[in-house]
Image: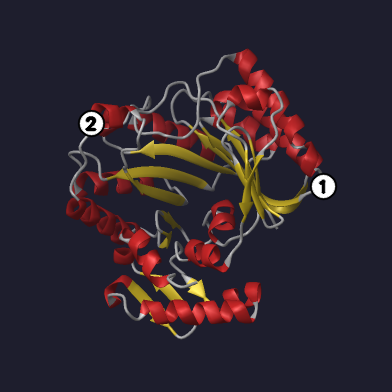
């Protein structure tokens, strides 16, 4: 069953590392976006949906009333499965006490909060508006409102970062009783303020050491790795993100949002004005090849399974799996785990996954 993604392109201010599409906005622009996002759902009315994800940007900036209106429209226009996972990304700064109770009443049942670090100096470097205390307060308010499925983002590989600082951030996040933790390696993307400032990152060995430390420390604290950058208490893996990584279909609405439905890919350009004026999504060609399916599944700790390849692609899938296994035998064994009916990357393999994928998918 497909997932549904809504891109909310608004931020109070742009973080210097971020290359997601977002803009500042006042109430009138947010109202216009809300109206247009609801209208843009019409062509897919009746679609069965199992997960809903409000991403951004900072979706929480819309406020509880607009968010509730958007989720209500999704429920009216689509067939939302019982027990669907409904996630909102939120900024920990400036949360009012009645915000999370209103979200719960509207039907949201999962939150993703951008903690990034528990170190005040690192938060200032990252341009974050919140303090560690703000994050703890936000999590506490969410839990008081009935949210038990809360994800926290962490960032590693920062200039001046150490395993000790990272360990304190992991302990802080775990101590807030989070159910899910995402740990991303900082990258300096072209066109971002960090790129223009010439920010220098730690060398590859230091960053790799922090990543492998995070994998081990998170597992020790009850968050086994299930994807390159994602860790969860058992049963709290992100169902929406698994839609992407397992090669399933999804519909995305909003400027910059991508979709994969009916074997085709399409997207809305990163253009808020065009979106508000009713611009249709652009075709992005076919999707769902065995190569793409294998690439996405190999992001997961469970890896690529022969049964999944065969179930989705028949004999061609089984043949492709056999070729991938053959290619894998030529790769350094510490980078992957090879079983007769499964191939998966180790944490060391995830660190060089782009190069490793080129090797194992060769000839497909």
**Residue 108, how many percent across, how many down?**
64, 40
**Residue 246, how many percent across, how many down?**
56, 62
Q: Residues within 10 Å of mark 1 (few under 14, many from 20)?
A: some
Q: Nearer the viewer, residue 269 or 144?
A: 269
Left or right of 250 in this view: 245? left
- Pointer 1 with pointer 2, Cβ within 8 A: no
**Residue 289, how many percent across, how many down?**
59, 64
Q: Quadrant of the N terminus?
A: bottom right
Q: Sequence-wise, which precedes: disc 1 or disc 2? A: 1
Residue 65 in sight here: no
**Residue at mark 2:** 198
Q: Report the residue at 65% width, 78% height from top.
A: 314
From this view, report whether residue 273 is shown above or below residue 58. Answer: above
Q: Residues within 10 Å of mark 2 (few under 14, many from 20)?
A: few
Which colour scheme appears in the figure? secondary structure
Residue placed furthest toward the bottom: 340
From this view, report whether residue 89 is shown above or below residue 184. Answer: above
């Amino acid at each position: 069953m497909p997932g549904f993604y809504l891109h909310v392109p608004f931020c109070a201010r742009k973080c210097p590392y971020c290359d997601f599409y977002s803009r500042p906005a006042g109430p009138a622009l947010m109202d216009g976006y809300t109206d247009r996002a609801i209208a843009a759902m019409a062509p897919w009315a009746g679609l069965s949906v199992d997960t809903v994800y409000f991403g951004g940007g900072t979706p929480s900036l819309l406020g509880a009333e607009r968010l509730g209106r958007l989720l209500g429209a999704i429920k009216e226009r689509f067939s939302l499965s019982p027990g669907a996972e409904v996630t909102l990304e939120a900024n920990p700064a400036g949360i009012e006490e009645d915000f999370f109770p209103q979200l719960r009443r509207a039907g949201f049942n999962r939150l993703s909060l951008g903690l990034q670090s528990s170190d005040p100096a690192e938060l200032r470097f990252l341009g974050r508006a919140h303090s560690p205390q703000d994050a703890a307060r936000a999590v506490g308010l969410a839990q008081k409102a009935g949210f038990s499925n809360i994800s926290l983002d962490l960032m590693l590989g920062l200039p001046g970062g150490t395993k000790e600082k990272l360990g304190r951030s992991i302990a802080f996040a775990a101590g807030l009783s989070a159910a899910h933790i995402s740990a991303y390696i900082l990258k300096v993307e072209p066109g971002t303020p960090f790129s223009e400032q010439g920010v220098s990152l730690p060398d590859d060995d230091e960053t790799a050491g922090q990543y492998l430390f995070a994998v081990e420390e998170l597992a020790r604290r009850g968050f086994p790795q299930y994807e390159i950058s994602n860790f969860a208490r058992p049963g709290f893996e992100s169902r929406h993100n698994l839609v992407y990584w397992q090669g399933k279909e999804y519909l995305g609405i909003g400027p910059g949002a991508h979709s994969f439905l009916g074997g085709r890919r399409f997207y809305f350009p990163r253009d808020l004005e065009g979106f508000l004026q009713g611009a249709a999504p652009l075709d992005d060609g076919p999707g769902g090849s065995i190569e793409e399916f294998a690439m996405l599944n190999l992001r997961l700790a469970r890896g690529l399974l022969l049964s999944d390849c065969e179930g989705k692609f028949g004999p061609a899938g089984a043949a492709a799996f056999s070729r991938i296994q053959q290619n894998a035998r030529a790769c350094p064994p510490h980078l992957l785990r090879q079983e007769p009916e499964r191939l998966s990357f180790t944490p060391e393999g995830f660190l060089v996954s782009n190069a490793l994928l080129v090797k194992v998918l060769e000839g497909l």
